[in-house]
Amino acid sequence: MLGAGAMGCLFATALHRSDCATTLLLRASDGRETVQVVVERHGRSTTIELPAASVAARGPISHLLVTTKAYDAHHAIATIAHRLRHDSKVLLMMNGMGLADELRADFPQLHIYSGTTTEGAYRLAPLHVRHAGQGHTRIGQPGTTTPPAWFHQWSRAVAACQWDGNIEEALWLKLAINCAINPLTAVYACRNGELASRPELAARVDQLCDEIALISSAAGQPRVATGLRRSVAQVIAATADNRSSMLQDVQDGRRTEVDYITGYLLNTARDFGIPAPHNAALLESIQKIDR
Ligand code: PAF
């Protein structure tokens, strides 16, 4: 697997513990054949020894889980492309949309799957994560209703993990929620809950939601559009004390994933000729912070 952030560590250790041979691919493995990953859960800390290898290692990869940042994934996959076979399965688990289509165009031989999760996990230090709350994980491939054989390993390893025959809808809903919450929290340096408790920010969330709903509908996702304001309000309430992933990226000096979140939304809006000035203004503000 590629990507040793919070979600990567969480899923890699879960798969490893359910006897699925899992190797963490590291940019600089320094010759290490294993790494120790620490997972904290309910106040208890568990150390798991995971097989590791350099991205430069040889040997075919039949199944690849990618949990890098969206903007790193294409390059990371290109680095190990020589190890992927004509029928390798690649599962993308990251924020944002657009990457799967880019990869299908550039690596047409690969079988690309996408996943989205509400698992709560954050990184305390390199290879050290806290699993803060159990969520729901959905995995799928556009047009594929029956889960492939490899999915059974996932359903055994990861609690509340389901095959989703309509994964595009789940990805669009996640995108819509991320568009409404993440850039605003990053610009105002506020926790998610302030988007509901500060009236001026709540009004901006509503303006964003109205644009996002129109774009989602045009993109063939009317169920995402219906009740979007309510869905966003629920996520804000459930994550009120959290710093969004985009705010964390900005505060930690990392590049944000805005191009794959609001950027993807605005590309879709452009395709359908839908004006989206509120989202466009936010994208511009984040891009100024980013570069
Ligand atoms: O990206 C995030 O931070 C999360 O997806 C969400 C749901 C916006 C909560 O903070």
Image (spheres, helix red, strand yellow):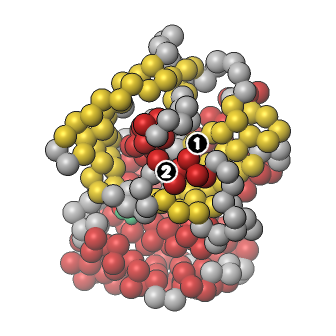
Q: Is residue 114 left or right of residue 204?
A: right
Q: Quadrant of residue 206?
A: bottom left
Which residue is pictured at 59% across the width and 63% down the height? 163
Quarter of the picture containing the N terminus is top right
Which residue is pictured at 41% across the width and 22% down the height? 35
Q: Answer yes or no: do the residues labelled 2 and 1 have beta carbons within 8 Å?
A: no
Q: Amino acid at mark 2?
A: Arg
**Residue assigned mark 1:** 65
In the image shown, does 189 or 69 lie closer to the viewer?
69
**Residue assigned mark 2:** 156
Where's residue 236, x and y in %?
31, 72
Q: Is residue 282 visible?
A: no
Where's residue 69, x and y in %?
51, 45
Q: CA distance from mark 2 to mark 1?
A: 16 Å
Where's residue 205, x and y in %?
38, 78
Label 2 SS: helix
Q: Amino acid at mark 1?
A: Leu
Kindly give the residue lying farthest to the left in the view shown: 43
Where's residue 132, x and y in %?
27, 52
In the image shown, does 108 or 16 lie closer to the viewer?
16
Q: Quadrant of residue 186?
A: bottom left
Q: Is residue 46 visible?
A: yes
Q: Is residue 203 above or below residue 282?
A: below
Kindly give the residue lying farthest to the top in the view shown: 31
- Density class for disc 2 (Cα within 10 Å; few <14, some 14-19, many ≥20) is some
Which residue is pictured at 39% across the width and 85% down the height? 230
In the image shown, does 210 or 9 lie closer to the viewer?
9
Q: Is residue 157 above or below residue 270?
A: above
Label 1 SS: strand
Tell me the mark number nearer the camera, choosing from 2 and 1.
Answer: 2
- Density class for disc 1 (Cα within 10 Å; few <14, some 14-19, many ≥20) is many
Q: Quadrant of ligand 1?
A: bottom left
